[in-house]
Image (cartoon, rainbow, N blue to C red):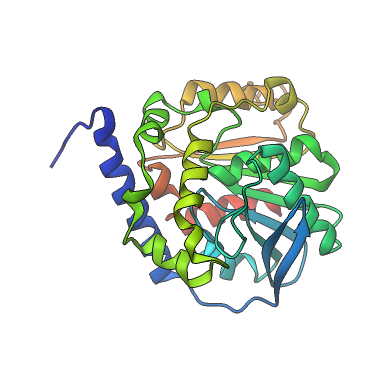
Amino acid sequence: MKRVFKGSDILNPVLIMALLFFTVLQSKAQQLKPADSGYVPVNGIKVYYEVYGEGRPVVLLHGAFMTIEGNWGQLIPELSKTRKVIAIELQGHGHTQFSDRKLAHTTLASDVTGVMDHLKIDSADVVGYSFGGTVAYQVAIQSPKRVKKLVIISSTYKSTGWRPEIANAFKNMKPEYLTNTPMKTAYDAVAPDKTKWTKFLEQMIAFAGTPFDLGDANVAKISAPVLIISGDNDGLDKVELMKTYQLLGGGISADLAPMPKSHVAVVPAQSHVGLMMQTKTILGYLDGFLK
């Protein structure tokens, strides 16, 4: 049945798809035990990480409200066959404790490099999805020598990079919408303090609804090659997406000039949530770009 959602009604499909996403990835994920895991004291909190496999390091940064397993459960078994995978749970997510520390992209990016310092990783490829993609942009901006290659999946470095209805959805979102959901069950299974669930949601919803901009000039200065992966209907403003690609040196005629080091892939018939379910497609892009 085809339906057009207006105003706050968009919350219903957004939440349904988010829950479907979480449930599907949890059920299909191959359960692997990390070779190493633990907490790193950094910037006043303890950040949780997991390490899988061996080889050149790649850091994974999850989307909002997600966990390592929920976001990357299908990709880690494949990536870890040839790479050392470091998956991090950002402030308040999963195993990482809730904190009243003000959320800021600069601080979250510093948390990431703090984990890298703990693991004695000078530089790595960094892959971020959605919320984690914005953090990944910030890592590349403030710590350019730490990022070899950058992969951004369905994300943007400024709030105006999203279509207006995305911002409107967060304006009307409430913590109670996620009560009695698989996301809550997963949180309860690993969170250091299960009583912080509502505070965590309030913090994240407020943060997601606050306009942000990491800066066009800063993005243009990113020295690492960047791969942007987007669904054709994932909520990103495609005009802004191509402006971003131009800042990174793309959008030229490669028959008349050298091929840019950064690439963009728009996957057809994919939403923001559905894109992360396309494991083979994403792996194909990652294998080609990160090799």
The residue shown at (42%, 63%) is 25
Task: Tell me where residue 245 sits by quadrant.
Answer: top right
- 92 sits to left or right of 82: left
- 168 sits to left or right of 230: left
> Which part of the image, by quadrant, shows the C terminus?
bottom right
Task: Tell me where residue 49 sits by quadrant.
Answer: bottom right
The correct choice, above or below, for 81 with respect to 117 in the image is below
Q: Tell which of 158 and 201 is nearer to you.
A: 201
The correct choice, above or below, for 168 with respect to 34 in the image is above
- The number of numbered discs placed on residues in the rendered structure image is 0
- 251 sits to left or right of 201: right
Where residue 159 appears, x then y in whole percent? 53, 27
Q: Tell which of 169 and 235 is nearer to you.
A: 169
The residue shown at (48%, 58%) is 279
The correct choice, above or below, for 28 with respect to 268 in the image is below
Where residue 8 appears, x then y in whole percent? 27, 32
Where residue 130 appears, x then y in whole percent? 53, 43
The correct choice, above or below, for 274 with respect to 25 in the image is above
> Which part of the image, by quadrant, shows the N terminus?
top left
The residue shown at (24%, 28%) is 6
